[in-house]
Image: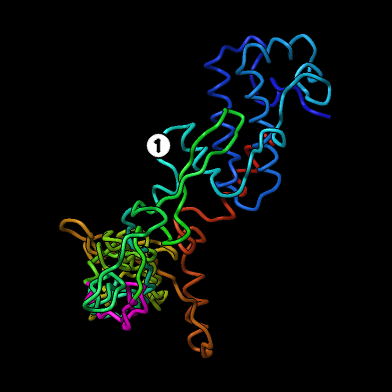
Amino acid sequence: MKRDYYEVLGVPKTADEQEIKQAYRKLARQYHPDVNPGDKEAEEKFKEATEAFDVLNDDQKRSRYDQFGHAGVDPQAGGGFGGFGGAGFDFGGGISDIFEMFFGGTGGAQRRSGPQRGNDLRYNMSLKFEEAVFGTKKEIQVPRFETCPECQGSGAQAGTQPETCSQCKGTGQATSVQRTPFGQIQTSHTCPACQGRGATIKSPCKECNGQGKVRKVKTLQIAIPQGSENGLNLRLSGDGEAGERGGPPGDLYVVLHVKPHKIFERDGNDLFCEYPISIVQATLGAEIDIPVLEGGTEKLKIPEGTQTSTVLHLRNKGVPHRRGNGRGDLHVQVVVMTPAKLNDKQKQLLRDFGNSVSEQQQMGSKTLFAKIKDNIRDVMG
């Protein structure tokens, strides 16, 4: 059973011509077969929307539909609406041209017949952590299609030239007339004789077999900027594959895959790491040597009474900014290590120490147990 045409387009029965056109354009762009190749459900929805538009956009058909419903416009019920079968609506070659002519712009065949830009290429590059942070230079080899040096892209053997296609007269396009829900429309499509080139080649170039392009491996020098992060795309304009029929080459995108570091983790331009300290260093304070990314160490002051998981900072020891000057910081989270395998004398010293100080002195400004007791007291009133 067919759905109500107003429901199909999502418009009220009071919708004017402009509202109907806007609703149809939205649905046509969403469900057009060129946008959803092979999707039968989308194709049916596109047909349904086009059928609804054909009726509601025509004053006479809309009037009959408003009075008699589908029976007023169904050809099997004498209404005279041709439907898709009667109109000869074809979802094969040429439908993209109908779509383009209705919504503006040039047809798909016209776009294909002129110069075509070459394909973009992607290269996945693996980098060490330090290479990405401080920048480096890399040499890569990229397989790609380049303009044939023998025929300069013409596809014809040296000393010969491509000849104008006799079928399309050099336009690269063939025309046909189709009946559609909008009437008869003349459409253009790629000439089957020359595949849109506008010319045929009787003596193909032996180097490229008439393709105008050959497979080559290009060696490129890539500058990796400092501060580069994992997943960064570096665009090299014009280093993709060669274009066709005089079109420009595509671009090469180098995608960076940065290996993790054994010590440091990165967040933006800041670095983070954990570093163990002894209970003596944490209690009395100390100055320790912290490894830094560029090699060597930097002095880090441990304040007296430092607790485990405290984060201390080394300014300007993080990642250099990719654009501009300056660096991020290095954040060091200290982990206080509990001594193990003490001898009897050491254990006794710790017992004596424990007996000589209060619980609050041992545990910090306020013990966890004391905090729990205070919370219980607050709850009980």
Indicate left or right for 188 with 28 as reference: left
Q: Nearer the viewer, residue 237 or 355?
A: 237
Residue 276 percent coordinates (x, y): 41, 75
Q: How many marks?
A: 1
Q: Position of residue 287 (x, y in %)?
A: 26, 73
Q: Residue furthest bottom?
A: 343
Q: Would residue 335 be seen by someone viewing this image from the given angle?
A: yes
Does residue 127 show up? no
Say which of 284 and 72 sits in front: 72
Please say if 257 is above or below 118.
below
Please name the residue that numbered disc 1 is placed on: 105
The quarter of the displayed image where residue 164 is located: bottom left
Colouring used for the render = rainbow
Q: Is residue 270 magenta?
A: no
Q: In the image, what residue occupies the spot 70% across and 40% down?
A: 44
**Residue 188's x, y, as percent?**
46, 45
Q: Quadrant of residue 2?
A: top right
Q: Secondary structure at mark 1?
A: loop
Taking the image as shown, residue 195 lies to the left or right of residue 329, namely right
Residue extending furthest toward the left: 325
Q: Amino acid at mark 1?
A: Gly
Q: Position of residue 142 (x, y in %)?
A: 32, 77
Residue nearer the viewer, 63 or 43: 63
- How packed mark 1 is, by other alpha carbons closer than 10 Å (few <14, some 14-19, many 20 or more), is few
Magenta segment boundaries in residue numbering:
203-222
- Tell me the quarter of the image containing the C terminus: top right
Q: Is residue 204 above or below residue 90?
A: below
Q: Nearer the viewer, residue 261 or 176?
A: 176
91 sits left or right of 275 in the view? right
Q: Residue at x 84, y 21 (%)?
A: 77
